[in-house]
Amino acid sequence: MLSILMLMASMGALGIALLSGAWLVFDILGTGLENSLPTLPAKALVIGLAYGVGWITAMVAIRVYGNLVLPFIIHYLIWGCLIGVCALYVLILQRLYDQAYNMLRFWAYLIIMVSALGAMVGLHLIVEDHDLRPLAIPLLVISMIHLGLIVFRYVFTLANSAYLVTDLIFFLSMAGFGYLMLAHIGLLSPMRKQLTNYFDRNSRVIQTED
């Protein structure tokens, strides 16, 4: 019963966090960053709090209480998060191509992408033996499209060369992240090992008390 309650709590918190995060991102891209700045810190804080609660609850439900349903749901959430990241990448790519942004907006775009990718990686850490390599393929495909648009924009059109630096920063960041996911070199292995050891110790304590 406790495992089922934790399943419901984790899915509720993670669902609220992901949906609210998506709403906040599209609100920023739609109404403009300047209009969202007054309430942005409070919104980001409560979304991060909901995600943290859902993440911890899911970890405990899986690693300590051995919930077998939650890992399958997390797998679907990861793919849903990837779809959102790809859609966000395309929307930001359109704005980068139009070159109608300032440095504040650019750093907001970059922070939004880093936050979205961080949410996806956080879900990846919940499930043991989850492989990020298939998720890297869509990101790398969009990165190659981004590279093609950069070449086309600065070679075949009248582009402002002052935006080239920001284009390259965004491209290299996304392509580098996708490459690290595809290379599977184990950057997250120490963190995953520490989490596994911690929850394994707590799981044994709870089983002993029972």
Image (cartoon, rainbow, N blue to C red):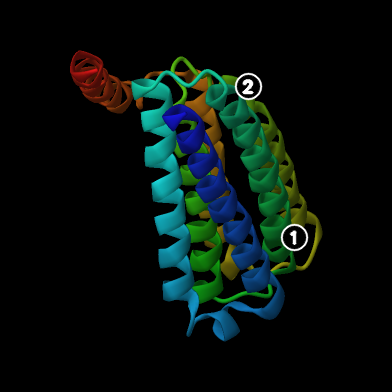
Q: Position of residue 63 (x, y in %)?
A: 37, 22
**Quadrant of the snapshot with the C terminus:** top left
Q: Kindly indicate the quadrant of the structure image that contains residue 133.
A: top right
Q: Position of residue 159 (x, y in %)?
A: 72, 67
Q: Position of residue 46 (x, y in %)?
A: 44, 65
* Dot 1 crowding, Cα within 10 Å, few <14, some 14–19, many 20+: some
The answer to whether residue 181 is left or right of residue 95 is: left
Residue at image location 62% in from the left, 36% down from the top:
77
Give the residue type that dot 2 points to.
Pro
Residue at image location 23% in from the left, 21% down from the top:
206
Give the residue type that dot 1 points to.
Gln
Between 99 and 26, which is closer to the camera in this rendering? 26
Mark 1 or mark 2: name the one nearer the start of the chain.
Answer: 1
Q: Position of residue 155 (x, y in %)?
A: 74, 55
Residue at image location 59% in from the left, 85% down from the top:
35
Q: Is residue 100 visible?
A: yes
Between 147 and 138, which is closer to the camera in this rendering? 138
> Which numbered marker is on residue 136?
none
At numbered mark 2, what does the secondary structure look like: helix, strand or loop?
helix
Give the CA distance from mark 1 to mark 2: 25 Å
Contact between marks 1 and 2 (CB within 8 A): the answer is no
At numbered mark 1, what does the secondary structure look like: helix, strand or loop?
helix
The answer to whether residue 178 is left or right of residue 126 is: right
Q: Is residue 168 visible?
A: no
Looking at the image, is 146 positioned above or below residue 74? below
Between 128 and 209, which is closer to the camera in this rendering? 209
Looking at the image, is 172 positioned above or below residue 19? above
Q: Which residue is mark 2?
A: 134
Q: Which residue is mark 1?
A: 94
Residue at image location 39% in from the left, 31% down from the top:
59
Looking at the image, is 139 positioned above or below residue 16? above
* Dot 2 crowding, Cα within 10 Å, few <14, some 14–19, many 20+: few
